[in-house]
Amino acid sequence: MQEYPIYKHLIQFSTMVDAQGNLAQAPVDTSAPKKEENGKEESGEAMAKKEDTEKEGGEQKDSFTYEGGDSQNGHKDDQIPAAKSDGVHEQEHGQAMNYSQMVQMSSLPPTANPLKWNRNYDNLSSQDRQEMLVDEIFALYLYRMSNRINQYYYKIVLAYVIFFRECLNEYGWGKKIESEGIRLENNPELKLDIETKQFCLVNNAEHAPEICNEFVTVYMEYKKNIFDIPKHDQIDLTINLCHWLFQCQFTCSKLTMIA
């Protein structure tokens, strides 16, 4: 797991890993699943509904379409309050804040350590968004989701993100060529990248929503023997992820459901 590309970004947010990447001893989880009023255990799926999503009304379909937008003028993540734009928060008189003061200003839980971050994820700049590649973006999504769902459903979300990433590696180059009207005969450097590099290692998430149909209807059908994610969870998480990417200005494409 530590060798998987997303991991090196996830450790920034983990309380189980120190700044040097060393694993700490896992705490014993003594918490039980939350109970509903009728006494039944609340499922991981129900807990996941705490995450805000925009969905088309009516019966769910497994077909998607997307429309281009302007990510520069799109919505920002309104659940993340603004913080200072530099990597280290400072007091008004210029002295650096200590850790306890920093976490009080952050929108993240008290256990988060902003000192481990590669950049200020509470207030990403336009340059940050341009520099962030797929693995870093997906790691941030996983962290935001981990604060809203329980551990049982998080396992499903983690598997989903890994599958979606691998699907993006498979279809991403083709979507990029198609969307940007690239002629490979005129771009030998890109042709070499396609032949030698994984899409997610050298690209951002701009074209991620474009693979949704292939992901749900084709790719996941071949992967169900590895980890079977129910179809309704695939659809819900696809809508959620793509909506989050658009809201956070990581893509100009806005995903919509079609009948």
Image: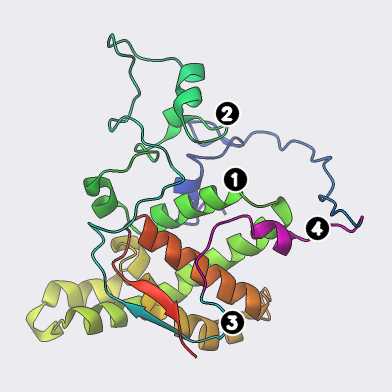
Q: Judging from the image, what secondary structure is the residue with disc 2 in?
A: loop
Q: Position of residue 39 (x, y in %)?
A: 92, 55
Q: Main secondary structure of the magenta part?
A: loop
| Disc 3: which residue | 58
**Alpha-carbon span between mark 4 and mark 2:** 26 Å
**Residue 28 vertical placement versus 238 (above, below):** above
**Alpha-carbon span between mark 3 and mark 4:** 24 Å
Of residues 59 and 84, which is closer to you in this image?
A: 59
Magenta stretch in the rendered image: 39-55
| Disc 4: which residue | 42
Residue count near mark 4 (Cα–Cα under 10 Å), binned few <14, some 14–19, many ≥20? few
Question: Which of pointers 1 and 3 indicates the residue nearer the eye?
Answer: 3
| Tag shown at residue 110 | 2
Of residues 234 and 175, which is closer to you in this image?
A: 234
Q: Residue at x 43, y 78 (%)?
A: 256
First of labels 3, 4 by sequence position: 4
Of residues 198 and 217, which is closer to you in this image?
A: 217
Question: Which of pointers 4 and 1 indicates the residue nearer the eye?
Answer: 4
Q: Judging from the image, what secondary structure is the residue with disc 4 in?
A: loop
Asked whether residue 46 is in view, the answer is yes
Q: Judging from the image, what secondary structure is the residue with disc 1 in?
A: loop
**Residue 87 vertical placement versus 73 (above, below):** above
Q: Amino acid at mark 4?
A: Glu
Classify residue 258 as left or right of residue 183.
Answer: right
Q: Judging from the image, what secondary structure is the residue with disc 3 in?
A: loop
| Disc 1: which residue | 147
Q: Amino acid at mark 2?
A: Pro
